[in-house]
Image: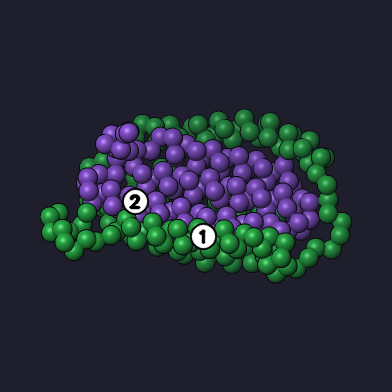
Chain colours: A green, B purple
Amino acid sequence: MVLYLLIYFIIILSATISVIAKKLINSAIMLAVLSIGVSILLFIYGAVWAAVFELSVCAGLITVLFISAVSLVKNDEESLSENRVKYIVFPFILIAIIIISSIFVPEYFLELQKFSTYNTEKEKPIGEFIWIYRGVDIIGQLTLLASSVFIIKHIFFKNKNIKENGGDI
Amino acid sequence: MNINFPLDWFFISILFFTGAYCMIVSRNIIKLLIGFEIISKSSLIAIITAAQATNNINLAQNIIMVMILIEVIVVGSGLALIVKYYRLNQSVDILKMINLKG
């Protein structure tokens, strides 16, 4: 139970820091810490495959994507004047939300849990879920991956005939 | 492992609020995507807690894998669009995106 609360504390703390951090690169790194916390939580719940997927993709790939994007748009970071007053207010609103939700949310979900039906049968292995029970999802995933590849290819399309603007448009 | 279901949802609601706040107040588009990531993490924890309460962990793992894949696609495409927009207009401020108006 202590480990469980500690992990949630790390998750909330890293989310808070990633919101109020002034530099975008710190936000991206804190997002990676959040992902690591979530994957440890998944390990605790027994969802081992999902945890490995989360750790490799969210904590690895997405962080790399964020850091590379931040370094590409870095010149604008200082000139963009954000309204920092909103960020100073944030911890106070967060504490208010914590207090209010600690009164109402657990009680509501304790009531809601009574409607859930517990699966008493032995669960099927995960391979059967991926390939048979939700096998159609594979087609959707492949379509999405292909579409994202085409999106990125067309966004960074380079026309060699146009020399203006560095041939970028 | 039997863990308190309402306590989980208390933390999930806080995490969701954090992400939503980040998406509402920030002017930088990359910060918006970070808020989106935080919200998707909260929904991911929500799915696994619900699965744990009803003993459907393997089905939830499959759903989480699909969710993570969609998350990566959205973030990858979004960041590519942001970098392209920055190259064209030298800005990532969401208030300066007036020329995207129809």
* Residue annotated with mark 1: A143
Where A39 falls versus B31 (above or below)?
below
In the image, what residue occupies the spot 48% across and 46% down? B36
At x 56% / y 41%, what residue is drawn?
A: B16
Give me the disc on residue B81: 2
Tell me the amino acid under the disc marked 1. Answer: Thr
Furthest residue toward right: A120
Q: Count neighbours of disc 2 (C-alpha within 10 A) and say few if under 14, some if 14 to 19, many if 20 or more.
A: some
Q: Position of residue B90 (x, y in %)?
A: 21, 46
B98 and A15: which one is in front? B98
Secondary structure found at label 2? helix
Q: Is residue A1 above or below residue B95?
A: below
The picture quadrant where one finds residue A124 is bottom right
As displayed, is residue A131 above or below residue B27?
below
Output the chain of dot 2: B
* Residue under the image location 56 percent in, 50 percent down: B41
Front-lying residue, A128 or B15:
A128
Residue A29 seen in the figure: no
Amino acid bearing label 2:
Leu
Task: Please state, as top left, top right, bottom left or bottom right, where the C terminus of chain A lies in the image.
Answer: bottom left
Q: Are marks 1 and 2 in contact (CB under 8 Å)?
A: no
Front: mark 1 or 2: 1
Q: Position of residue B49 (x, y in %)?
A: 70, 50
Q: Is residue A62 left or right of residue A50?
A: left
